[in-house]
Image (spheres, rainbow, N blue to C red):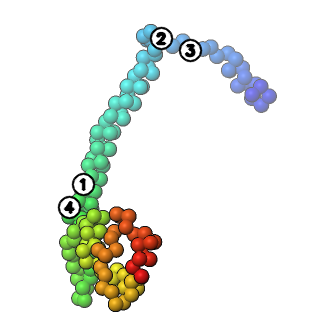
Amino acid sequence: FSCFAPLLLKDVIASLEPLLLKSLPTFKGIDMKSVGFSCGILGAVVLASHFVLNPQVEQLKRAQEALCGGLLDFVFLEDALGFIVPAKTTPFTTEESWRIYEESPTYAQRAVISIVTGPESALTAKDFGSPRDGSWTLSGIADLQ
């Protein structure tokens, strides 16, 4: 500054005196101006939350209910005329699928059983037991042959 400033500007700055301002009130060392700004910011956050964020949250909840609420256990397909056709389904459970497998195996399961035991035997899944009860062992399969 002292190298590049014009002499007139240096003289003006040198002749300036500090401005006397009345000091702000304090309470136990806390400046009231900073307390006022802190309260103002807190009030602005509360107001913004109430008037801006809460309506958005409610709108998102309504959108979630519209997209994900209601009947969820269904499938749909497009028929030959191009119409979408929905159909209600039952929810999948592991226990139910094991019961269905053990009572009436599918064609693919019967085909695998016939390959393992031979085409002349008409064994069902009940003859093999269940993988859950530990009856599927290498010696158990060898005994079938």
Residue at image location 36% in from the left, 34% down from the top: 44
Q: Can you give x and y, in whole percent of width and height, for residue 105 in the image?
A: 29, 78
Tag 1's secondary structure? helix
Which label lies toward us, 3 or 1? 1
For marks 1 and 4 on the same chain, the one whose residue lies earlier in the sequence? 1
Amino acid type, residue under disc 3 in the picture = Leu
* Category of crowding for the residue at label 4, using alpha-carbon neighbours closer than 10 angstroms: few (below 14), some (14–19), many (at least 20): few
Q: Give the residue at mark 3.
A: 19
Work out which quarter of the rendered image holds the C terminus and state it: bottom left
Q: CA distance from mark 3 to mark 1?
A: 59 Å
* Number of marks in picture: 4
Q: Give the residue at mark 1.
A: 62
Amino acid type, residue under disc 4 in the picture = Gly
Amino acid type, residue under disc 2 in the picture = Gly
* Category of crowding for the residue at label 2, using alpha-carbon neighbours closer than 10 angstroms: few (below 14), some (14–19), many (at least 20): few
Which label lies toward us, 2 or 4? 4
Which label lies toward us, 2 or 1? 1
Depth check, front residue: 31 or 139:
139
Depth check, front residue: 98 or 138:
138
